[in-house]
């Protein structure tokens, strides 16, 4: 069994400061010109790190029922996209006092013209996370220790300039994390794995197809 020694918040913040986030181009058939500030909240405990995600309420017009990070569109009073991410996390799951550690890549979505602008944040140890029923069906936690110790990660094939690649997909109970959220999560796990000096589990294709998560499979995904 792989022994995973997880990093502290300060070490992850240093790694994020040295990290060079990418601005991934718009996907085919999309403009991806709309920016959504999202928070990637992490809970530290003596035994593990838990990444906080949400199951979006099924009645929402955009991305209803999907697993995502708390986040949304900027409002006029927001002075930055980071402020948007923090505000949305407070509105959606009651998260206050989160300490931003750094940011991840700008990731376009296939299912809308939005792109995720993710900010990794440390959740205060005494935080009580309460989902807003208007937007969130449930608060979810993904164990970093358990995920990095998996023998493999699931991937769905997609074509990039004639080359077949795998888009990550994560099982979280009976739910699936896919698309832009899964790419952000995979980027974060890569940073944590480097700090923990363990390899990321390899990809394995075959169990899931785009038809399992999307009504209309994409021609290509980034």
Image (cartoon, rainbow, N blue to C red):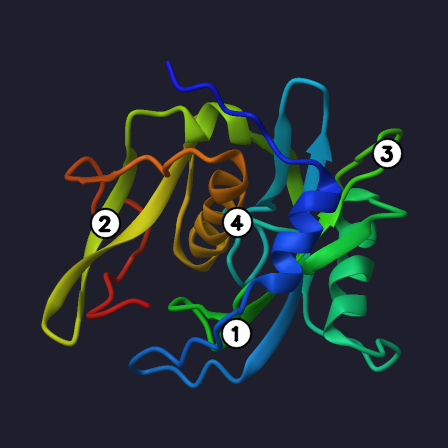
CA distance for labels 2 and 1: 21 Å
The image quadrant of residue 104 is bottom right
Task: Please name the residue that numbered disc 1 is placed on.
Answer: 114
The image quadrant of residue 24 is bottom left
Q: Residue furthest top?
A: 1
Side of 91 where 185 appears, left or right: left
- Checking the image for residue 127, the label placed there is 3
Q: Earlier in the sequence, mark 4 or mark 3?
A: 3
Q: Earlier in the sequence, mark 3 or mark 1?
A: 1
Circles 4 and 3, Cβ within 8 Å, touching? The answer is no
- Checking the image for residue 188, the label placed there is 4
Query: Relative to 162, does residue 6 appear above or below in the rendering?
Result: above
Q: Earlier in the sequence, mark 3 or mark 2?
A: 3
Disc 3 residue crowd, few under 14, some 14–19, many 20+, Cα 10 Å: few
CA distance for labels 3 and 1: 29 Å
- Image point 38% across, 82% down: which residue? 30
- Assign a secondary structure to mark 3: loop
Q: Earlier in the sequence, mark 4 or mark 2?
A: 2
- Assign a secondary structure to mark 1: strand
Side of 9 where 27 appears, left or right: left
- Assign a secondary structure to mark 2: strand
């Amino acid at each position: 069994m792989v022994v995973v020694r997880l990093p502290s918040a300060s070490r992850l913040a240093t790694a994020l400061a040295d990290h060079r986030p990418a601005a991934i181009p718009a996907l085919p058939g999309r403009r991806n010109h709309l920016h959504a500030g999202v928070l990637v909240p992490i809970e530290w405990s003596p035994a593990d790190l838990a990444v906080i995600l949400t199951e979006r309420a099924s009645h929402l017009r955009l991305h209803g029922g999907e697993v995502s990070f708390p986040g949304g569109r900027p409002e006029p009073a927001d002075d930055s996209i980071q402020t948007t991410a923090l505000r949305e996390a407070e509105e959606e799951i009651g998260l206050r006092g989160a300490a931003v550690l750094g940011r991840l890549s700008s990731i376009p979505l296939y299912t809308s013209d939005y792109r995720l602008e993710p900010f990794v944040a440390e959740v205060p140890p005494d935080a009580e996370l309460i989902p807003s029923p208007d937007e969130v069906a449930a608060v979810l936690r993904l164990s970093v220790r358990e995920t990095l110790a998996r023998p493999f990660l699931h991937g769905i094939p997609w074509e990039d300039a004639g080359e077949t690649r795998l888009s990550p997909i994560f099982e979280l109970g009976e739910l699936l994390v896919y698309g832009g959220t899964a790419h952000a999560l995979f980027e974060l796990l890569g940073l944590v794995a480097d700090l923990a000096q363990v390899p990321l589990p390899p990809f394995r294709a075959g169990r899931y197809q785009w038809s399992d998560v999307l009504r209309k499979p994409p021609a290509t995904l980034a």
